[in-house]
Image: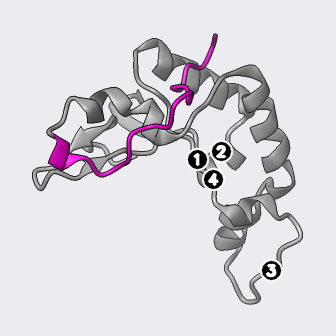
Amino acid sequence: GIGDADRFANRLPAGLWEFPASTVRLAGRNWPVAGGGYFRLLPLSITRRAIRHLNAEGHPAVVYLHPWEFDPEQPRVVGASSLSRFRHYVNLERTEARLRALLQEDRFGPIRQAFHDCLAAAPLGARSVPEPAQGERALEAGR
């Protein structure tokens, strides 16, 4: 959550679309809420509330996870600092269950569908993501 960064989908001057990870604005700062270490560190109730808040404002939440975050048995890095170990390994054993809970409660879709409207409004040559396949749904959490 970079303080002055755009929080939502935006088109950069060169025409490339940027889809930032979801943040909430609190106390004048952008706070990451729905991806990577933040997904593992924050209580699931806070992540849920943040996603629903973003969707209620008309902004699809961008949730991301790294493949290694689903492997609690991964080898540990020898010599890593306590802070690095904490950031990398905290709640790995809960990642899959947390994601499954979110997927059962809300509807999610691929990023190309969730942002189809803003991409469709761009000139054809400016698109950086393919159009969604027939039948894919946009992100509509909380319904």
Which badge, 3 or 4, comes first in the chain's sequence?
A: 4
- In the picture, measured across the screen, residue 88 lies left or right of residue 71, that is left
Amino acid type, mark 4: Leu
**Position of the C terminus by quadrant:** top right
Numbered label attached to residue 35: 1
Residue 122, quarter of picture? top left
Q: Is residue 113 above or below residue 128?
A: above
Residue extent of the magenta highlight: 124-143
Q: Residue furthest bottom?
A: 79
* CA gap, disc 1 and disc 4: 6 Å
- Single out the mark in the foreground, 1 or 3: 1
The mark nearer the N terminus, 1 or 4, is 1
- First in sequence: mark 1 vs mark 3: 1
Residue under circle 4? 65
Here the colouring is: one colour
The residue carrying mark 2 is: 39
Q: Are marks 1 and 2 in contact (CB under 8 Å)?
A: yes
The reply to whether callout 2 and callout 4 are in contact (CB within 8 Å) is: yes
Distance between mark 3 and mark 2 Cα atoms = 20 Å
In the image: residue 99, left or right of residue 34: right
Amino acid type shown at disc 1: Gly
Residue appearing at x 47%, y 22% in the figure? 54
Query: Which residue is nearer to you in this view: 58 or 85?
Result: 58
Q: Secondary structure under badge 4?
A: loop
Residue 58: give x, y in percent of width and height: 40, 16
Give the class, few, some or many, for how many residues have Cα within 10 Å of label 1's Cα (few <14, many ≥20). some
